[in-house]
Image: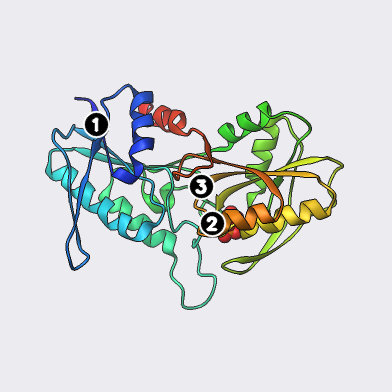
Amino acid sequence: MRLRLHTFADSARGARDLATHLGTAPPALVEVHRFPDGETLVRVAAPVARHAVLVRSLFDPNTKLIETVLAADALRRSGAHTVTLVAPYLPYMRQDAVFRAGEPISQRVIGSLLRRAFDRVLTVEPHLHRTRHLAETFGRGARALSAAPVLAEWLRRAEGDILIVGPDSESEPWVRAIGRAAHRPWVFGSKQRLADRSVRIHFPPLPATTRAVIVDDIASSGATLAVAARALRRAGIRTVDAIVVHAIFTPGALARIRAAGVRRIVSCDTVPHPTNRIATAPLLAAALAAR
Ligand code: R5P
């Protein structure tokens, strides 16, 4: 057996799509037992191939991270020579610096935990800003896949004149890549985060258009999309839609975004959510097959 996928129940759908694209057997489910004291025991299913691939999207991450590194150990003890983690969403990536005295660099802490457990980490759009390459924190075998091509494809097929809008200057190269590939104009704002659910966004003068699509890598509290949408509507843009890669959407986020006048919200399937419309399995399968 060349390669076998293993997954947890919360990532089973994405893992099945990936297996279909790879032409491998359906993924084996990792069993999870929770002890009364809150500890977890995982058990991986035999047979374990020489090259094991564990698929898990690490949204809502704290318990999942522990279960995921335990499963990596179980796969090795069951015969895997290499263990790859496919984490379509990688958590703790935004804390990539000490922003205020007394804080950790969470990205590096999680990076060293996962690089010790896995030979290779594969993810999609992992919010790389101050860290230029995923391998710097997640080890030599780590690879970050850009979602820009699949977002651009979606936008290319959408009807009408569309202005692509990035909510902050950090997203500029990404928004530019999407705009160029989609053959659409783009613009980006400058964002200041005031608190977990509060941001301020300023846009330069906007070109005349009736429709804008905000693109962002993550939607969490929904504050960024809501504030950006209000600013665009104030500037006279009648229809505002949004496309995000990672649909975290904490409780109340979707309502906040819709109340700000966003008509349609679409996401990639890196985090399972009712807004998922854009598949990432083809990207992940191509990267795994090219190893
Ligand atoms: C931050 O820089 C990211 O690109 C997203 O804009 C941010 O994580 C969205 O978070 P929220 O939905 O809470 O505003």
The type of residue carrying mark 1 is Arg
For mark 2, what is the residue? 220
Say which mark, if any, is on residue 143: none
**Neighbourhood count class around disc 3 (C-alpha, 10 Å): few under 14, some 14–19, many 20 upward:** many
> Depth-wise, is mark 1 or mark 2 nearer the camera?
2
Distance from label 1 to label 2 (Cα)? Answer: 32 Å
Give the residue at x 71% y 46%: 165
Residue 173 appears left or right of 140: right
- Look at the image and tell me in which quarter the N terminus lies: top left
Q: Is residue 291 visible?
A: no
Q: Is residue 67 visible?
A: yes
- Look at the image and tell me in which quarter the C terminus lies: top left
The type of residue carrying mark 3 is His
Nearer the N terminus, badge 1 or badge 3?
1
Nearer the N terminus, badge 3 or badge 2?
2
The type of residue carrying mark 2 is Ser
> Depth-wise, is mark 1 or mark 3 nearer the camera?
3
For mark 3, what is the residue? 246
Compare residues 143 and 222 and report the one nearer the observer.
222
Nearer the N terminus, badge 1 or badge 2?
1
Q: Is residue 198 above or below residue 3?
A: below
Compare residues 202 and 154 and report the one nearer the observer.
154
